[in-house]
């Protein structure tokens, strides 16, 4: 479970309505199987109601936070004033308003309302949310999480006894001139 989903931990790559692209980042507070964790994490407005009631964290809290983050994103994307962050009821009123104005497709509004349910047992699981009809017609893609190499790796030892770190490119060749900070220059 992520435990800190909010707009500040969301990356939006494209708002193309036929293929929007977004990702969640900053997994520093995530825990596997951290049920019952009591400490409040993340911005207060994006914390699920059951956490405030002292019931601790479950996977359902991420669905609440994701639903609110999606609502916030749609709201901001439409150029509206920032969402009133005064509570759950205000968020549901804002969702209803955006749906009435046609800014959120009906099926997506249904999904968001279920994600923002006060009762965590009524929220969809991540799989149920992904399988929801709200995504029909939207191309699903998974971003590559493969780590990109800079092409230079640090090897142990020193070069010519000078205390300078020995560098090696990924193709096995030594760079002609390492960066100044590696040579000890300021």
Image (tube, helix red, strand yellow):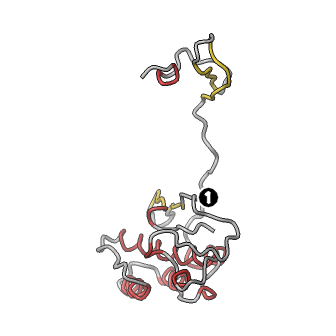
**How far across and how far down the image is residue 107, in percent?**
52, 82
Q: Residues within 10 Å of mark 1 (few under 14, many from 20)?
A: few
Q: Residue at x 59, y 55 (%)?
A: 143
Residue 79: which quarter of the image? Answer: bottom left
Residue 24: which quarter of the image? Answer: bottom right
Please tell me which residue lies in front, 42 or 9: 42
User: How many circles with numbers are drawn on the protein?
Assistant: 1
Q: With 44 as the anchor, is 114 left or right in this view?
A: right
Q: Residue at x 61, y 58 (%)?
A: 142
Please tell me which residue lies in front, 130 or 88: 88
Please tell me which residue lies in front, 33 or 153: 33
> Does residue 136 appear anywhere in the picture?
no
Please tell me which residue lies in front, 176 or 135: 176
The image shows residue 87, relative to residue 28, as above or below, that is: below
Q: Residue at x 62, y 51 (%)?
A: 144
> Does residue 179 appear anywhere in the picture?
yes
Most distant residue in the right direction: 33
Residue tagged 1: 142
**How far across and how far down the image is residue 62, in percent?**
57, 73
Q: Residue at x 59, y 66 (%)?
A: 2
Most distant residue in the top direction: 160
């Amino acid at each position: 479970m992520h435990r800190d989903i909010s707009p500040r931990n969301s990356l939006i790559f494209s708002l193309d309505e036929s293929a929007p692209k977004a990702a969640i980042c900053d997994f520093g507070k995530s825990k596997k199987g951290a049920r019952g964790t009591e400490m409040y994490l993340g911005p207060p407005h994006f914390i699920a109601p059951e956490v405030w009631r002292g019931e601790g964290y479950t996977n359902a809290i991420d669905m609440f936070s994701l639903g609110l983050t999606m609502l916030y994103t749609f709201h901001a994307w439409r150029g509206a004033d920032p969402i009133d962050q005064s509570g759950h009821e205000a968020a549901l009123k804002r969702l209803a308003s955006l749906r009435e104005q046609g800014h959120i497709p009906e099926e997506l509004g249904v999904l968001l309302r279920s994600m923002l349910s006060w009762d965590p047992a009524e929220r969809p699981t991540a799989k149920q949310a992904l399988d929801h009809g709200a995504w029909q017609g939207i191309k699903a893609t998974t971003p590559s999480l493969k780590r990109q190499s800079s092409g230079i790796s640090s090897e142990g030892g020193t070069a010519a006894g000078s205390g300078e770190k020995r560098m090696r490119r990924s193709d096995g060749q030594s760079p002609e001139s390492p960066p100044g900070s590696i040579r000890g220059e300021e």
